[in-house]
Image: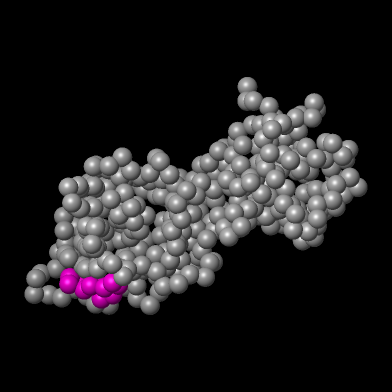
Amino acid sequence: MKKLLFIAAALAMIFTACNNTTPQPEEPINQEVSIEEYYPIMENTKYSYEGEGNEFATYTVLVDYISDNRIQIRTDNGGTESITVLEIKDEQLSILYSRGETYFRQNFLNGEYEDGKVLLKTPLKEGNSWAYDENTRAIITSLSKEVVTRLGNYEALEVTLEGEQGKTINYYAKDMGLVKTISLGDGYEVSSTLSSVENNMPLIQTITLFYPNADGSLDTIDVQIEFNTNDEPIDVIEKMVKELSLHEVLSPNTTINELYFDEEENSVHVDLSEDFIREMNAGASFEALILQSLTNTLGNYYGVGEVYITIDGGPYESGHIIIREGEPSLVNFDNVNPKE
């Protein structure tokens, strides 16, 4: 049941609906209406949904990335955060990729994905149906269902997904997107209804910065970071670390050339400019603490145990420390002081 709800919640966070004018029964819907008209992309907008019937039915949605005909959304139901990549192509809206337990920022739009699960497909008229996946059939069951929300009443497009384990009904309103979802099965009914829409709302996360202590240990400080739609962690994290320059992790002229999460290896790769070594001005012991600080900061944020550190695309090599090509730095909290 929770799996079915997750699919319904992560699928259709911001899709729009049909025209607010109720069509007469004898008049067919305008078949020239495109999927794009039912899909408003609102940057830096937070959608909140109020749930009934399950603790995970209440959730929020933010748009992480938008590029061409793809969008990445982030869903937070209070228990976990997940991301979903969607695409509009060939007159249909599809889910290309979903990933749970994703508490870090990463752009997954450019992956090579197979054909996904189809959420909407033209022509947008009552009775049109298609295969959502191999076990579930989708059908447009109404063009003008009235849906009551805290924000008002909406005349919505009703799309029903029905499979072996039950069915999910999604309601989309024009210029608003998903306004309600109902999941039904044997002995249960769970619903999520749009309760608020807030503009100019970035994703706010907390990152723990590790930094050297003169006694040979590491201290920490928790810092809030903000991501607007299409902001990359390479820029936000570098700016945050440099603003805390007193903690001596990155020198003023150091540039993060590349920073990314490797899903296959479950590791993080960071490539720094040569200024990182040239401006460090530290002995071997303190340099090791700086490297451990960087490793712990990135490893902790991305939730991995291995961080690969390179300099201008090549191996790390200073006067004191050499990190061989392909050798990871390991996250280690043994010498970290407790927070005060």
From the viewer's perspective, tell me whether residue 105 is left or right of residue 156: right
Residue 248 image-quadrant placement:
top right
- Camera-side residue of 304 and 176: 304
In the displayed image of the protein, which residue is found farthest to the top? Answer: 340
Question: What residue is drawn where x is 45% and y is 72%?
Answer: 114
Q: Residue at x 24, y 42 (%)?
A: 52
Q: Is residue 20 left or right of residue 276?
A: left
Q: Is residue 162 left or right of residue 251?
A: left
Q: Looking at the figure, which quarter contains the C terminus? A: top right
Please give the name of the residue rendered at 52% of the width and 61% of the height, measured from the top-left corner. Answer: 108
Question: Which residue is farthest left?
Answer: 26
* Residue placed most toward the observer, 286 or 174: 286
Q: Where is residue 211 in the image (x, y as percent from the top left)?
A: 72, 35
Q: Where is residue 101 in the image (x, y as percent from the top left)?
A: 47, 48
Whole-percent x, y for residue 229 in the image:
50, 54
Residue 241 visible, this angle: no
Q: Is residue 283 visible?
A: yes
In the rendered structure, does residue 123 fall within the stretch colored magenta? Answer: yes
Q: How many labels does the image show?
A: 0
162 above or below 305? below
Q: Residue furthest right?
A: 319
Name the magenta segment's main secondary structure.
loop
Q: Does the magenta stretch include residue 143?
A: no
Coloration of the structure image: one colour
Bounds of the magenta span?
Answer: 121-131
Residue at the image point whose x is 68% and y is 27% from the top: 337
